[in-house]
Amino acid sequence: MAGLVIFTGANSSLGVHAAEHLLTKFPEYTVLLTVRDDSSSDVNTEALRKIISNHSNAKATIRALDLSSLSAVHAFADTVVSEIREGKFPSIAAITCNAYYWNLIRDPELTADGYDKTIQVSHISHAALILRLLGSFSPSGRVILISSDAHWPGKNSSETYPPAIPDDLNLLVDPVVDSDKAGRGFQRYANAKLAMTTWMYALNRHLQKEEKLKTITAVAMNPGNLLDSRALTTNTPKSKAIMQKIAVPLLPVLRLMMGPTLRKSAPAGVDVAEMTFSADFAGKRGFYTLLDKDESSPDSQDREKQERLWAQTLKWAKITKDNTVLQAGL
């Protein structure tokens, strides 16, 4: 039993390919694949079940996890901690935070916790999950945060309003409402990816301050812009779906103009699985584009912003000294 890997958003376009690769190449790991809807009526979850069924020796479990609910996240963490303590699962080798949410056609949606749904699903709940489970990690555990080039102002063609870590951090959880739903919706998504990336640096710094946790590492990874992603047809203007149909057949030509980060979900899923499991990335920290070490945006590397966001994220995520083993920075 090489260890437990928790993978959120496992039935996504990228997630199913990552699951296929990890079950094929890394069968020694136990895998807990989380999805929002684990019922048989969800076609994407059923596709994930089919992948698992094709691997007779797979040590894989699908479990529901609603990242738009902090109570659900904390309850999930409690259950996993108990199962590891009881020997039902091995210690955690990695958590891959792949799930996200966006809404480009409506005003911001607030969760029952009172936060914008986009940043709660993408950032706040993942932070809660990681910090709650740190005590169940193996010494060489990894945290993989799925970022995007959208976190860097001006790098994504869908950007209308640039992402930023504002002076008033509450603007991240209670964002601007105006008539440009697509533009503001994409900004909320980009802000969530920026927050996740910025928080990664603070997480690494605080982990390294504690003897028992200093060998646990975190990376934020841009897996590329995925032309065949289902996200382009979910909560988006019809124009995005039309552009997807036009662009996918033209991918080889478009890549010549736009570079290797424009690609399909399958190779992206493979890369995320490799980042999660491969010995090539043991002990690595920082930001990656595909599988190459890279620089993240200037905003994300601002230490003062990192620490402000770290402190506020603890409050949003309801993390205290009583429910995480990490004491540095609390």
Image (spheres, rainbow, N blue to C red):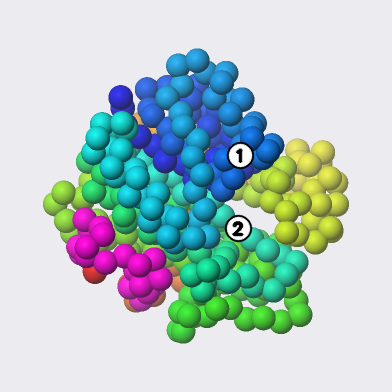
Question: Is 234 placed above or below 139 here?
Answer: below
The stretch in magenta equals 308-328
Looking at the image, can residue 233 be seen? Answer: yes
Residue topped by disc 1 = 39
Residue at 54% over, 34% down: 18
Provide residue 289's location: percent of width, then percent of height.
51, 49
Work out whether 56 lies above or below 126.
above
Measure how far apart labels 2 and 1 are at the Cα level. 19 Å
Residue 59 in the image: state x and y as whole percent. 42, 25
Residue lying at the far left in this picture: please name it: 211
Please rate how many residues cluster around mark 1, counting C-alpha atoms within 10 Å: few if below 14, some from 14 to 19, many from 20.
Answer: few
> What's the amino acid at mark 1?
Ser
Comes first in the chain, label 2 or label 1 = 1
Which residue of the protein is positioned furthest toward the bottom in this rendering?
A: 168
Q: Is residue 122 left or right of residue 315?
A: right
Q: Nearer the viewer, mark 2 or mark 1?
A: 1
Q: Residue at x 55, y 68 (%)?
A: 111
Q: In which quadrant is the N terminus drawn?
A: top left
313 drawn magenta: yes
Whether residue 265 appears in this view of the structure is no
> Of helix, strand and loop, which one carries label 2?
loop
> Is 163 rendered above or below residue 133?
below
> Which of the numbered marks, if any, corresponds to residue 97?
none
Out of 170 and 308, give the one closest to the viewer. Answer: 170
Q: Residue at x 21, y 56 (%)?
A: 325
Q: What is the x, y in percent for residue 166?
A: 49, 80
Q: Which residue type carries mark 2?
A: Tyr
Q: Mark 2 highlights which residue?
A: 101
Structural crowding at the residue carrying mark 2, measured as other residues with C-alpha within 10 Å and reported as few (<14), some (14–19) or many (≥20): some
Image point (55%, 78%), residue name: 174
Residue 151's quadrant in the figure? bottom right
Instruction: Residue 235: name its quadrant.
Output: bottom right
